[in-house]
Image: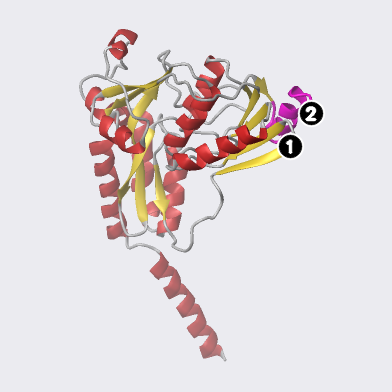
Amino acid sequence: MKSKVIFLVLFALSSLTVLAEPPAKRERQIETILELTKANICNPHFLETPQWQEFVTTLEQAKTLNLNDEEFARLFNQASKKLPFSHYYLNYTKGGSSSSRKNFSLEEIDTNTALLNVASWSRDPQAMIKVIGQIESKGYSKLIIDLRDNTGGTLDAAVILGQYLTNQTVDAGTYITRSWFEQTADYPTQDEIAQMDYLKEMSYAEFGRMMQQPAFRMIIPGHNNKVFEGEVMVLVNENTASTNEPLVHLIQQYHLGTLIGTKTAGNMMSGRFFKVSRKLRLFLPVADYVTAEGIRLDQLGVTPDVQVSSGQALDKAKELLGL
C-alpha cells in the first residue's frame, strides 16, 4: 500500500512538471513576444515608457519562466493592464468547442419597445440588417440597445446600426498606424487630418487595405435609407470596449440617443493576432484612434449621459421611456 501511495505522489509531481514549460522554451517565447511587439506595435514610443520597462521586468523574472502556458497568459494579461495602451494580451487556446451565443438578438419589452442585445460585433453585417428589418416590421417607437459587456469586434455591423440611427454624414474619427508614428511621436493636428484619405467602403477587407497608410479617416456617408425615428437608449458599462466606443461617442455627439450606465472601458485601438506558439497568440495594437474632435478614447472611455450601475441600467432606461 505504501509503495502505491509513493507511486501516485511521484506520478502527480511528474504531471505538474509536464504542465510547465521548460525555462529555456519560455525565454524564447518571451523573446518572440518582445520582438513581435517592437516590430508591429502602432506607436513604438509606447515602449519608451516606465510602464513598459516594468512590464518587461515582470515577464523576465525567474518565477515567470516556470509557469505553464495558461498561468503565463494570465500573468501577462494582468500585468498588461498597467500599460499606457490597450489591445495587448495573450490568448491561450485550450481547444474544444466555441461558444454558440448569438451576437445579436431582439427582445420585445412591449408592443412599442424593443431591446436589441449586442453581445459582440461580428464580421457579418447581414445579421444586423436582419435584426433591423425585424424592428421595422414591428413598428417599434422605442429602442434600447444593450452594449454592456460587449468587448468589441469588427466594424461592419456597427456601421449598419449607426446608419440606422441617422442618415447624416458622420465623421467617425481617424486611425493612425505605425508608419505615422515612425516619423513623429505627435498625433496629427486637425489640419493634417483634413488632408487625409478616408475609408470609402465600410468593410473589414477595405479597412485592412487602408491600414497600409500612415493614417486615414472614417467618414460614414449620408444616405436615403430608413432610419429609426423613435427614442433610443444605449446601455454601457466598464466592459463596453473597442468598436463600441466610437459608436457610443458618436451617438452622444450627434444626439442620437441617451447613454446609460457606467463609463466605458477606454480600450479603443485596432489590433490583430500574431502566433507565438501552438497554444499562445499575441494580440497587439496596430493602429491608434482619435475622434473627429481629436480625442484619444483609449485610456479615457466615454462617460454616459445618465450614470447608474451596470445592473441598474436597463431599469433606468425603462423608467426614462415611461415603461
| Image coords of residue 153 (percent x, y) | 45, 39
Quadrant of the image containing the C terminus: top right
Q: Which residue is mark 1?
A: 109
Which residues fall within the magenta stretch? 308-323
Q: Going 42% across and 57% down the picture, which residue do you hit?
A: 93
Q: Is residue 309 magenta?
A: yes
Q: Is residue 139 magenta?
A: no
| Image coords of residue 74 (percent x, y) | 46, 50
Q: Which residue is mark 2?
A: 323
- SS type, badge 1: strand
Residue placed most toward the observer, 122 or 1: 122
Q: Is residue 101 above or below residue 288?
A: below
Q: Going 35% across and 34% down the picture, which residue do you hit?
A: 52
Q: In the picture provided, is 46 more to the left or to the right than 258?
A: left
Q: Is residue 190 above or below residue 36?
A: above
Going by the numbered disc 1, the residue's amino acid type is Ile
- What main secondary structure does the magenta stretch of the protein show? helix
Is residue 67 at least partly visible in the picture? Answer: no
Residue placed most toward the observer, 226 or 321: 226
Q: In the picture provided, is 31 more to the left or to the right than 124?
A: left
| Image coords of residue 274 (percent x, y) | 30, 47
Spot the residue most to the top.
191
Q: Going 42% across and 54% down the picture, which residue do you hit?
A: 92
User: Do the CB atoms of the residues marked 2 and 1 lie less than 8 Å apart?
Assistant: yes
Q: How many dots with numbers?
A: 2
